[in-house]
Amino acid sequence: MLTYTQALFRSLKISVILLVLDMFGAFLLRGVIYPLETFGDMLLLETALLFLFAGFVDFGTSVAFVQFRKSVFASKETFSAEKRKDAERRAIALVGSGICLFVILIVLALFRG
């Protein structure tokens, strides 16, 4: 079970890993001359994808979606409050890293302004 402190540290770890990969990718794609524009675009795209993926993780264990899977796909899965809480905490880690990346993107935009 993931506590909120662990979710915060997990979101910071995800953010740092994505930042390092973005910096490396920006230098590979655009070279040394214009890496900040590519870096900002990559951050914006990853922030949006993190928010969407967090929503999918959270929604996938909701009561409505479990009932939908039962009726449409004849799934044997039942709703579990424990799975729901775990999915919420995983989604919190993803949203937290998305917020961190978005704040860095705003700082980058102000710096480039």
Image (cartoon, rainbow, N blue to C red):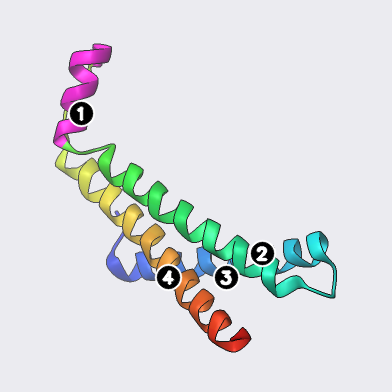
| Crowding at mark 3 (Cα within 10 Å: few <14, some 14-19, many 20+) | some
Whether pointer 3 and pointer 4 mark residues with C-beta atoms closer than 8 Å, the reply is no
Q: Which three-letter amino acid code belongs to the residue tagged 3?
A: Val
**Circles 2 and 4: CB atoms closer than 8 Å:** no
Eye-nearest disc, 1 or 2? 2
Determine if the magenta segment contains residue 72: yes
User: On the picture, is 27 further left or further right than 110?
Assistant: right
Q: Give the numbered dot on residue 9.
A: 4
Mark 3–mark 4 Cα distance, whole angstroms, equals 11 Å
Task: Read off the residue under disc 1.
Answer: 66
Expressed as whole percent of the image width and height from the top left, the position of residue 37 reads 68, 70
Outermost residue to the top: 74
Cα–Cα span, label 1 and label 2: 36 Å
Magenta region, main secondary structure: helix
Residue 69 picture quarter: top left
The numbered dot on residue 22 is: 2
Amino acid type, residue under disc 4 in the picture = Phe
Q: Earlier in the sequence, mark 2 or mark 4?
A: 4
Q: Which residue is mark 3?
A: 16
Say which label, 3 or 4, has the lower sequence index.
4
Determine the residue positioned at 57% across, 81% down.
Answer: 108
Q: Residue at x 15, y 32 (%)?
A: 64
Which comes before the other along the chain, label 2 or label 3?
3
Q: Earlier in the sequence, mark 3 or mark 1?
A: 3
Instruction: Say which of marks 3 and 4 sits in front.
Output: 3
Nearest the eye: 54 or 17: 54
For marks 2 and 3, give the CA distance: 10 Å
Rounded to the nearest angstrom, the CA distance separating label 2 from label 4 is: 20 Å
Q: Position of residue 36 (x, y in %)?
A: 70, 74
